[in-house]
Structures are given as structure tokens and as C-alpha cells.
Image (tube, rainbow, N blue to C red):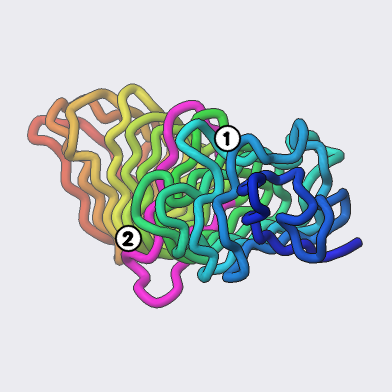
């Protein structure tokens, strides 16, 4: 096992993963190695240089803030560990220094994003992430990706440190939002917990939404929230007039719920349990609340 630091500038082989002299200590990385991409780098890591078939099982992959080159290209990401038995143990990314691209694909049981630029390709993730911690940066998931547990956290500015985009076709099990801005067009299979920030949801069901703060914008069409617990924050369905359903809802004094979506077609399947807070309905709506 060894630590391999990317240099990338071997004459005539610039950016070639498979050139031993592009690494320090010299030698192409092998399974079990720790990979470092930092201020020692002198060239991009190019798409054609990825491990053959993404087959190597590296113990860790680290990109630091002083890595000033691209990781991947416009053509696609660097591919690592696509099989469950070839999973990199730890992925740590601070892509703040990457000029245009930091694009990664693979299977990662433990991944943390510490920073990035502001473009959609500044930190673009494909593949499977068992634990994904987002501290700061613009993070774009790719259609088909999987997140088992995602934590949207913050470094210094709670409301804006993280900007996360989740397109359609992703598999999201649990998402815990402590700040930042999330734009999501996929279902959340088990739970979404919100303490702060904003979550704009345009497609997909949610099994359980626990909201303690922040603003949840429900812009879905024909989708369902099975259990809605409003402890605080603002739940807002006013941005479209399309039918949608809340199966069970409990509400507490610190919460505000805008259930007026303009179409009188937001359905509460079961009577809501109301312990306080502010609820706004469309005129002419029929509803039942238990106090």
C-alpha cells in the first residue's frame, strides 16, 4: 500500500494516468493505494487516463483546494470502482481550485465535498454514494445516481454554502438538510429532514417529510407526501395549481403551511392533526382538521 500523488507532466505523456513518471512516488497506482491530487499537480487528469475499467480498489481519493487543474473533461468523468467489491473507501473533494471540471463516477461508501466552483461541472457526481456529506460548493448529481444517506451541511454561511441539484431518475433514500439550496426532481424514498435552507421539489414522492425550519417548495405534479410533520419552517405549495396529495399531516405552532395551490385540488387524505401554526387554504376548499 502506498500514497500516490499526481504530477501529470511527464514529457509527451502529459495527463496520462498509466505513465509511472506522472506519479510521485513513481509508479501507476494499484489497489489499496491512497491517491492525492494537490498543489504538486502540474497537469489535468484526463478522461482517457482513468483506471482501466475503473477496476482498482483504492483506499482513498483526495482532491485538495490547491489542486488547480481539471479532473475529467467535457466528454465525461473519471470512473472509479463501479462494482461493489471494488469500492474506494473514502472520497474527499475540495474542488475549489479546479478551473472547469471536477467530474467523478464510481461507488463510494464514504464521500465528502468540502468545496467547489460555482459551475454545474465544478463538482459533478455520478454513481453510488452510501454516505454523502456536502459541506460547501455547487454539487450536481447525474441522472441514475444513488444516494443512501445525504447530509446537506454548511461551513460558514448556512443558507448558501451548498447548492445541490438532483435531476430526475436518481434514487434517494434519506436526505438531511441543515442549510443550503436544494433543487430536486426525484423521489425521496424514506425521509427528508429539513432544519434550514430551501428545498424546491418538482417531481417525485416523499415517504416522510420532517420539517423544523427552512422553506420547502412543493412544485410536484400528481405526487404524494405520505407523512408530513411540520414542526417549523414554511411549507409552500403555491407555485403551481397541479393536483397532489398529503396522506397524513401533523402540524405544530412554529410552522406555516401554504396549502393554497390555486386549484383546490391539494388533497389531505386523512384529517390533519393540528397543534398550532398557520394554515392557508384556497377559498372554497373542504378540509378536516383534528385539534
Viewer-closest of 3 and 199: 3
Regarding residue 24, the answer to whether it shows in the image is yes
Q: Position of residue 247 (x, y in %)?
A: 42, 33
Q: Say which residue label 1 marks.
A: 145
Viewer-closest of 287 and 94: 94
Numbered disc 2: secondary structure: loop
Callout 2 crowding tier (Cα within 10 Å): few <14, some 14–19, many ≥20: many
Whether residues under marks 2 and 1 lie with C-beta atoms below 8 angstroms apart, the answer is no
Residue at image position (39%, 39%) is: 184
| Stretch of the chain drawn in magenta | 150-173
Judged left or right of residue 111, residue 170 is left
Q: Nearer the viewer, mark 2 or mark 1?
A: 1
Sequence-wise, the earlier of marks 2 and 1 is: 1
Residue at image position (24%, 56%) is: 256
Cα gap from disc 2 to disc 1, whole angstroms: 26 Å
Looking at the image, is 238 positioned above or below residue 113?
A: above
Viewer-closest of 146 and 283: 146
Looking at the image, is 279 positioned above or below residue 36?
A: above
Magenta region includes residue 170:
yes
Q: How many marks?
A: 2
Amino acid at each position: 500500500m502506498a500514497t500516490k500523488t499526481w504530477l501529470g507532466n511527464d514529457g509527451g505523456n502529459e495527463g496520462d494516468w498509466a505513465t509511472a513518471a506522472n506519479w510521485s512516488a513513481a509508479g501507476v497506482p494499484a489497489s489499496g493505494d491512497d491517491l492525492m491530487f494537490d498543489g504538486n499537480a502540474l497537469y489535468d487528469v484526463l478522461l482517457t487516463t482513468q483506471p482501466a475499467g475503473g477496476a482498482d480498489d483504492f483506499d482513498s481519493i483526495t482532491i485538495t483546494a490547491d489542486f488547480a487543474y481539471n479532473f475529467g473533461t467535457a466528454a465525461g468523468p473519471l470512473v472509479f470502482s463501479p462494482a461493489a467489491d471494488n469500492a474506494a473507501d473514502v472520497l474527499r473533494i475540495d474542488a475549489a481550485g479546479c478551473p472547469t471540471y471536477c467530474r467523478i463516477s464510481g461507488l463510494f461508501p464514504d464521500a465528502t465535498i468540502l468545496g467547489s466552483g460555482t459551475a454545474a461541472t465544478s463538482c459533478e457526481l455520478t454513481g453510488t454514494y452510501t454516505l454523502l456529506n456536502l459541506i460547501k460548493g455547487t454539487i450536481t448529481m447525474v441522472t441514475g445516481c444513488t444516494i443512501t444517506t445525504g447530509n446537506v451541511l454548511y461551513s460558514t454561511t448556512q443558507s448558501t454554502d451548498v447548492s445541490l441539484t438532483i435531476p430526475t431518475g436518481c434514487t434517494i433514500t434519506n436526505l438531511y438538510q441543515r442549510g443550503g439550496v436544494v433543487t430536486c426532481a426525484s423521489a425521496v424514498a424514506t425521509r427528508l429532514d429539513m432544519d434550514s435552507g430551501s428545498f424546491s421539489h418538482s417531481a417525485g414522492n416523499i415517504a416522510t417529510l420532517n420539517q423544523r425550519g427552512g422553506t420547502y417548495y412543493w412544485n410536484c405534479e400528481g405526487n404524494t407526501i405520505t407523512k408530513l410533520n411540520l414542526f417549523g419552517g414554511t411549507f409552500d405549495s403555491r407555485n403551481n395549481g397541479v393536483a397532489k396529495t398529503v396522506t397524513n399531516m401533523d402540524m405544530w405552532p412554529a410552522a406555516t403551511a401554504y396549502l393554497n395551490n390555486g386549484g383546490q385540488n391539494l388533497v389531505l387524505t386523512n384529517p390533519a392533526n393540528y397543534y398550532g401554526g398557520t394554515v392557508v387554504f384556497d377559498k372554497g376548499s373542504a378540509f378536516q382538521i383534528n385539534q
